C-alpha cells in the first residue's frame, strides 16, 4: 500500500518536466526549435510565421537580372513634389475666317470652252544649247535630232572609240541600221574642240571616210550616228591573217583617205586595223577621228597607240603628217602577221624603248613579196624627212600594179573573202 503514492509522485514529476520543456521550446505560432539549433542561430523564425494569420501577404517573386545590372533603390520616395500646372492669364486670340469669294477664277483673254494652256517649251540647259549653236556654225549641213533616245533602238556593242563605245541601232519606223557613238559632253575646252573636229571630218562625205548621218546633244551627251559597216580589219585578223593582195587593197584605199585628210590640214594620229572598216560591198573606210589634230599649229604631244607611234611622236619632237605614214607601215605588217611589231611587250615604256633603240621593224610571221617588203621599209624610215608622202606611196603602188610587180584584190573579192572567213569563225 505504500508503493502507490510513489508512482503518483513520479508521474506528476514527469508531467511537470514535460510541461516545462514544452514551454521553453514553444514559440508563438506553434513552432518548435531544438536548443542546439537555436544556439547556433541557423534556424531563425521566419517573419511570415510571426504575423497574424488574418493578414496574409503575397510572396514576392525573385526577378532574374544579368550580372552587372542593379536596381537603384528609391531612397527619396515622394520627397519632391511635382509642380502644379499654371493657368495662363493671357486672353485667347480670336480666329478670323476669310470670307468666301464668289468671283469666278481668272481666264486669259483667248479663253473658250476647249481652251487649254500650251505645253511648255522643252527645257534644255544653256550649255547644251550653246554647244548646238557651235555645231551648226561649224557644220551648217549637220542634221541634229531632238529626241535621240526615242529615235534609235538597240544596244548591241560593236566596237569602241577614243571618246566612247559604238553600238548598233535601228531608226524607229524604218529599217535603216546605223552605228551610234555616245560621248560625254565634258566642260574641257580642248575636248569639245576635238568632238567638233571629229564631226567636221565625218561630215565631209569622202568615199573612204566614215560618214556622219545624224547627231544630237541630249542630257549632257553627244550622240553621233554614222554608217554601219560589216566589220573592222581587226575582226578579220581574229580569224586569220590577210594575204598580200588583200592587204595592198586595204592600204591603197586607206591612202585615199589619208591624202584627203592631209590636204585638209588634219593628222589622224591613230591609224591601225581597229580603225579600218570594211563594208558589205568591199568598201574600205577610215574611222575614229577622236585624236585627229590640225597641222596649222605645232604638234608635239605623245598621242596615239604605243605600238603604232612614230619615233618623233615618242620623242615628243614637233611632227607633221608623216607620222601617219609610219602608222600605215605598222598596219601593213599587222594585216599580214596578224599582230603588230613588239606585240609581246606589254608596258608602253618598254615599247617606246624598243622603237627608239632597235632597227625599223619588218615582217616576222608572213612571207610577202620583195616589193611589199620594200614598200614597208620605205614607210618605216626612222627620220620623217626620208619618208614619202601619201601621194608618193599611191604613185609607187599604182606603178608596181601596172608593171605586175604587185597584186591587188578588187572590192568584190575583198567582200567575198571577209564574208567567208567571218561566217566560218562564227
Image (cartoon, rainbow, N blue to C red):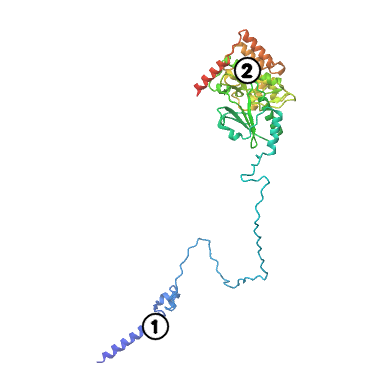
Q: Position of residue 154 (x, y in %)?
A: 55, 32
Q: Position of residue 239 (x, y in %)?
A: 53, 21
Q: Nearer the viewer, residue 98 or 176?
A: 98
Image check: 46 left or right of 291?
A: left
Please identify the residue farthest to the front as the structure is shown.
112
Q: What residue sits 58% from the left and 35% below the top?
A: 150
User: Dot 2: what SS?
Assistant: helix
For residue 161, which quarter of the picture?
A: top right
Labels 2 and 1 touching (C-beta < 8 A):
no
Q: Are there few (<14), some (14-19), or many (20+) residues within 10 Å of tag 1? A: few
Image check: 363 left or right of 43?
A: right
Q: Point out the tag, 2 or 1, that comes first from the N-terminus.
A: 1
Spatial CA span between label 2 and label 1: 135 Å
Circle number at residue 253 = 2
- The answer to whether residue 68 is above or below residue 139 is below
Q: Is residue 181 visible?
A: yes
- The answer to whether residue 115 is above or below residue 210 is below
Please identify the residue farthest to the top as the structure is shown.
403
Which one is closest to the eye, mark 2 or mark 1?
2
Circle number at residue 50 = none
Q: Position of residue 202 (x, y in %)?
A: 65, 25
- The residue indicated by pointer 1 is 23
User: Dot 1: what SS?
Assistant: helix
Q: Is residue 360 visible?
A: no
- The answer to whether residue 251 is above or below residue 112 is above
Q: Nearer the viewer, residue 70 or 341?
A: 341
Amino acid at each position: 500500500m505504500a508503493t502507490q503514492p510513489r508512482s503518483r509522485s513520479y508521474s506528476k514529476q514527469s508531467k511537470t518536466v514535460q510541461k516545462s520543456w514544452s514551454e521553453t521550446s514553444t514559440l508563438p505560432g506553434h513552432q518548435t526549435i531544438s536548443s542546439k539549433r537555436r544556439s547556433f542561430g541557423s534556424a531563425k523564425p521566419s517573419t511570415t510565421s510571426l504575423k497574424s494569420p488574418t493578414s496574409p501577404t503575397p510572396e514576392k517573386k525573385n526577378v532574374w537580372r544579368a550580372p552587372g545590372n542593379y536596381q537603384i533603390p528609391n531612397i527619396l520616395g515622394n520627397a519632391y513634389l511635382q509642380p502644379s500646372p499654371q493657368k495662363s492669364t493671357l486672353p485667347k486670340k480670336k480666329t478670323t475666317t476669310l470670307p468666301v469669294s464668289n468671283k469666278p477664277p481668272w481666264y486669259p483673254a483667248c479663253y473658250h470652252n476647249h481652251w487649254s494652256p500650251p505645253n511648255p517649251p522643252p527645257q534644255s540647259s544653256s550649255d547644251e544649247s550653246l554647244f548646238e549653236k557651235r555645231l551648226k556654225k561649224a557644220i551648217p549641213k549637220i542634221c541634229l535630232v531632238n529626241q535621240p533616245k526615242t529615235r534609235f533602238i538597240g544596244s548591241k556593242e560593236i566596237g569602241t572609240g577614243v571618246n566612247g563605245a559604238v553600238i548598233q541601232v535601228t531608226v524607229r519606223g524604218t529599217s535603216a541600221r546605223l552605228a551610234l557613238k555616245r560621248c560625254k559632253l565634258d566642260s574641257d575646252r580642248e575636248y569639245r574642240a576635238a568632238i567638233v573636229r571629229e564631226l567636221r571630218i565625218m561630215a565631209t562625205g569622202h568615199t573612204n571616210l566614215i560618214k556622219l548621218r545624224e547627231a544630237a546633244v541630249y542630257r549632257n551627251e553627244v550622240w553621233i550616228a554614222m554608217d554601219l559597216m560589216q566589220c573592222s580589219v581587226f575582226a578579220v585578223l581574229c580569224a586569220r591573217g590577210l594575204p598580200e593582195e588583200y592587204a595592198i587593197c586595204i592600204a591603197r584605199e586607206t591612202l585615199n583617205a589619208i591624202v584627203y585628210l592631209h590636204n585638209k590640214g588634219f593628222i589622224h594620229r591613230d591609224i591601225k586595223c581597229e580603225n579600218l572598216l570594211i563594208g558589205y560591198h568591199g568598201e574600205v573606210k577610215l574611222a575614229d577621228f577622236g585624236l585627229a589634230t590640225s597641222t596649222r599649229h605645232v604638234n608635239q604631244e605623245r598621242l596615239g597607240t604605243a605600238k603604232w607611234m612614230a619615233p618623233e611622236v615618242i620623242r615628243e619632237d614637233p611632227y607633221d603628217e608623216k607620222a601617219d605614214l609610219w602608222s600605215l607601215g605598222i598596219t601593213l605588217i599587222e594585216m599580214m602577221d596578224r599582230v603588230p611589231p613588239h606585240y609581246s611587250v606589254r608596258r608602253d615604256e618598254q615599247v617606246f624603248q624598243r622603237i627608239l633603240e632597235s632597227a625599223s621593224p619588218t615582217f616576222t610571221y608572213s612571207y610577202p613579196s620583195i616589193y611589199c617588203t620594200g614598200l614597208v621599209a620605205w614607210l618605216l624610215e626612222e627620220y620623217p624627212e626620208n619618208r614619202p608622202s601619201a601621194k608618193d606611196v599611191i604613185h609607187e603602188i599604182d606603178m608596181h600594179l601596172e608593171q605586175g610587180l604587185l597584186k591587188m584584190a578588187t572590192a568584190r573579192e575583198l567582200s567575198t573573202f571577209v564574208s567567208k572567213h567571218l561566217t566560218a569563225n562564227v
